[in-house]
Image (cartoon, coloured by chain):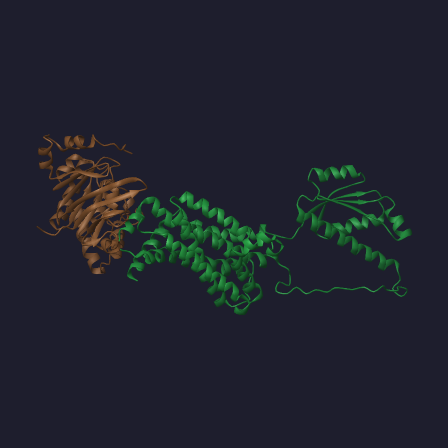
Amino acid sequence: MKTPVIKANKLTKRFGDFFAVNEISFEVYPGEIFGFLGANGAGKTTAMRMLCGLSIPTGGEAQVAGYNVFTDTEKIKKNIGYMSQKFSLYEDLTVLENINFFGGIYGLTDKQIKEKSEKLIAQLGMGSEAKKLVGSLPLGWKQKLAFSVSILHDPKIVFLDEPTGGVDPITRRQFWDLIYDAADNGISVFVTTHYMDEAEYCNRISMMVDGKIMALDSPANLKKQFSVASMDEVFFELARGAKRKAD
Amino acid sequence: MRTIKFLLQKEFKQIFRNKGLLPVLFIAPLIQLIILPLAADYEVKNISLAVVDHDHSSYSRKLVSKVGSSGYFKLAGYNESFSNMFGLLESDKADLVLEIPSGFEKTLVKEQKQKLFIAVNAINGVKAGLGGAYLSGIIRDYNSEIRAQWIHPAKFNPAPVIEVTSTNWYNPFMNYKLFMVPGILAVLITMVGGYMCALNIVKEKELGTIEQINVTPIKKAHFIIGKLLPFWIIGIFIFTVGLFGIGRLVYGIVPAGSMFLLYSFLSIYLVALLGFGLLISTFSETQQQAMSVAFFFVMIFMLMSGLFTPIDSMPGWAKTMANCNPVTYFIEVMRMIVMKGSGFVNIWFHFVVVILFAIGLNGWAMLNYRKTS
């Protein structure tokens, strides 16, 4: 088997006596689409922030792209892409300017930036929007653009935190086409979502309940394991036992 | 270096696209510099004077006309009833009441001695003090005129008199604008620089874009330089327009000292100031918070900087605060270089202090700004 790009072993984040993330262990492989599911407040975002080097864990260990999440956060940052719940491109810059800026701070050369932006704009079909301010684009377009920008520097892994929230079904479908493209190019995709149809698109899924991973397998195996017909029911089976209140 | 180039490009594009902010950044300080010095006038003029004249003699009328022609006073009332005139004082229509007793001329001529009464509305201490002093001065003048008239110079056996002659250095015409404009410019630069820098960074926190920056391998120092440098450049630009545009053209102020020295100080001062803005931004989550905190400090900085009131006359604790205020040093340096033409020997201490401020504030802000929690 290939070496995993993410390797977490009993990773823990504690705030006082509250265990936001409680000893989670899993591995993610190159080119894999790894769905990270759980109710609101289950600890998904905290776990993801630790893996991105935005938050230092309080216990356990983890390696992302071969680097330690305690000591090498800046090296991790070179090798990952990240797209948060909040839209995080600059709305007062144009599409091209955003691509240019993020390409630049990831250290791409001018030539690379030029090639990448041409390819990206062609892929997204945004030829006539390239010089428009990002703030003027519809949400679905923004999200697709944000995803494309987050993998501009060919990271090993891209973390997507509820990337399709508030997006219409057609755009969501297109968004997932982009995700498949990225995975085909060897980028691992680590994605949280509340849409169970999207969960079906993942290679493997982990279910978090109260800071712990309660189930981890392919969607088909999970449905078999719980003897149910849909991922919706798997989610209900697991999340029902949650003690934490959703926020 | 390349990272900084991309950051600067981004910042300048964003600043110049922000149509709401641009006028606040570039036009407002210049308008303020035109308007504020006119209001920050120490000279007390147009003092309303009510005269109670019980005498109605030629001497009393001469005195009143002399007071009136001094240019400092305007006559609010002329009457022989003290209570009428005091009413004017009570209703704020008069600042001063001068009472000329009956028999003023007679007693003055006969006994060569007379008493006048002045009642002062002292709510505004400065106006009261200066008004009273002006009026006393005019009466003293009037007195010596009468003496000169009556006593024949030949027969005059002079008592020893000490006469004081003074020369006004650095500001020979005692033009208060020469004093105020450099100080106000210093405060305006402080306000614009401090606010804008703090708000800019907090805005990225509010929008969530800072999180995107934090997951990039961008170095903390690069990010901070990318944030501070645009405002440093804008600060120097506004200062230049303020000093040479408004100061020179509107007020005719020609700096007496070395421009190199002034701009060296300004450069370091701006680094300190922007470090202060950065520090505020690291403590604030929203623009509203940053604005309130910055407003609190800017008010103190402004009022405790010796801009309007001399630091030497403050109580001890206030003096200590003023000495911990970077604006104090900038205003002093501005006034010293622009008005006196002071050299480095005179202001080296100010340089030391502002360098310490720059290191301290930026160091603190750097420690406090975290990419990782």
Please state the horizontal and vertical placement of residue B124, each as a whole percent of the image. 66, 45
Horizontal arrangement in the rendering, residue B139 relative to residue B173 (left or right):
right
Residue sitting at x 27%, y 44%: A13
> In the image, is residue B327 above or below residue A220?
below
Quadrant hosting residue A245: top left
Please state the horizontal and vertical placement of residue B104, each as a whole percent of the image. 86, 47
Please state the horizontal and vertical placement of residue A227, each as a whole percent of the image. 9, 30
Res B46 seen here:
no
Res B25 seen here:
yes
Horizontal arrangement in the rendering, residue B291 relative to residue B218 (left or right):
right
Q: Quarter of the image containing the N terminus of chain B? A: bottom left
Horizontal arrangement in the rendering, residue B312 relative to residue B206 (left or right):
right
> In the image, is residue B322 above or below residue A176?
below
> In the image, is residue B28 above or below residue B265?
above
Chain the render paints brown: A
- Which residue is nearer to you in this view: B336 or A30? A30
Please state the horizontal and vertical placement of residue B150, each as a whole percent of the image. 88, 58
> In the image, is residue B266 above or below residue A92?
below
Counting the numbered discs, the total is 0
Horizontal arrangement in the rendering, residue A109 relative to residue A15 (left or right):
left
Image colour for chain B is: green
